[in-house]
Image (spheres, rainbow, N blue to C red):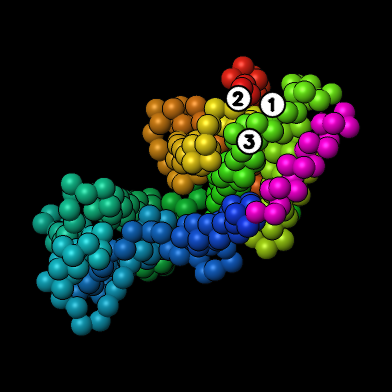
Amino acid sequence: MIRILDLAWKDLLQNLREKQTFMFLLIMPIIFTLLFGFAFGGVGGTESDSRLPVGVLDQDNNLFSQALMKLLQSSDVIRLEEKVDQSPADLEKRVTDNKLAAALVIPAGYSDRFLAEDPLKLTVVADIYNTAGSTAQGVIQTAANRLKISLMAAQVAAQIVGSTSESEETTLEKTLAAWDRPPISVRVTTPATSGGIKENAFAQTSPAMMAQFAIAGLLGSAQIIVNERRSRCLQRLRTTAISHSQILLGHFLAMFVLILAQIFILIVFGQLFLKLNYLGQPLAVLIMMLALALFVSGLGLLIGAVAKSEDQAVIFALIPMFVFSAMGGAWMPLEFTSKTFQAIGHLSPVAWAMDGFKNIIARGLGLESVLIPAAALLGYAVMFFGLAVWRFRFDE
């Protein structure tokens, strides 16, 4: 055991002497975490309105046109942009220039002829072959139909009750308000954690860059093994009391400690500076840390066994870093991709690392949610370690 620790300590000292170690272990992941995080919206800033912008021109400005405007203003899908001194041509141009999803013109006399046999029609400018345009058009049409049905219901109710004490405007307001109090409602809830989960773009980028640059951090460790093989240092080690398996375990232990320290520092950075709730589930986080470090260490040992030069070690470290990160959702959340790509993406160990950490800090789930991702990472660790043992050989 002492020989294994001595060899691991030697590797750690060699890594810490290299400037690129701190570059790939700490500086680069923090920089890219911040860059990608701010690109996805950052944290603590003002909330942006993601509703579709719809321009409106109310030429009627009467009871029913104002009621329609109120319905549209309360929409969760579109937001109205009403400007003074704009014309229908201006609105149409803004739609054509993709500055608006759609435009609505309410003609003069709309309220007076609302229930007439030949009512004035609303003018909607939208590209129906565009998702945003067709969606906005549907919302406007639904609101107009709702307004008409509400007025008809109000008139029928007044006839049944026989009351004329209330004005048409008051009756319409009550009928529209009834739409917001349906007899059956559905409420969607998301799981909560102690302290609560808030939207934070760094909940995507923090574990993503942590996993990506953990693989990049293997450069120094893999190059140490390559140099020892080329200099016949490993061959000389075999003539000593240290065994083949102890040599492998020593290199593996050095990588494991180095990567685990990197992950720990990045998690502390995420907790303190990015306001991510890693410590909400400390045991789950610890399991994911160990599983990720074991997987990366197994991969590093395999790279050291396969590479025959320092250049090959760099290539063999960067290729899986880019491939696993791209497939595993480090650059773009897999939730935004198709089901097929999500299934393919989970061939990447990074996808499982992302699942485990995001279950904790983004979805507010507990220990059970990381067991499968951690098991998947451990499976990759065993596979890569086994391949490394099989391929590891010393130059004669």
- Per the image, the residue denoted by label 1 is 235
Of 339 and 172, which appears nearest the observer? 339
Q: Return the residue at label 3.
A: 231
Q: Distance between the residues labelled 2 and 3?
A: 9 Å
In this figure, which residue is indicated by the disc labeled 2? Answer: 395
Count how many numbered circles sit on residues in the image. 3
**In what element is the residue under mark 1?**
helix
| Residue 157 can be seen in this image | yes
Q: Between 4 and 60, which is closer to the camera in this rendering?
A: 4
Proximity of marks 1 and 2: CB atoms separated by less than 8 Å:
yes
- Quarter of the rendering containing residue 344: top left
Is label 2 in a helix, a strand or a loop?
Answer: loop
Tell me which secondary structure the magenta stretch mostly adopts: helix
Q: Which amino acid type is marked by label 1?
A: Gln
**Residue 287: image location, x then y, percent:** 74, 35
User: For mark 3, does the 10 Å Cα neighbourhood hold few (<14), some (14 to 19), or many (20 or more) residues?
Assistant: few
User: Of callouts 1 and 2, which one flags the residue occurring earlier in the amino acid sequence?
Assistant: 1
The quarter of the picture where residue 70 lies is bottom left
| Magenta region | 1-18
Q: Which amino acid does label 2 sit on?
A: Asp
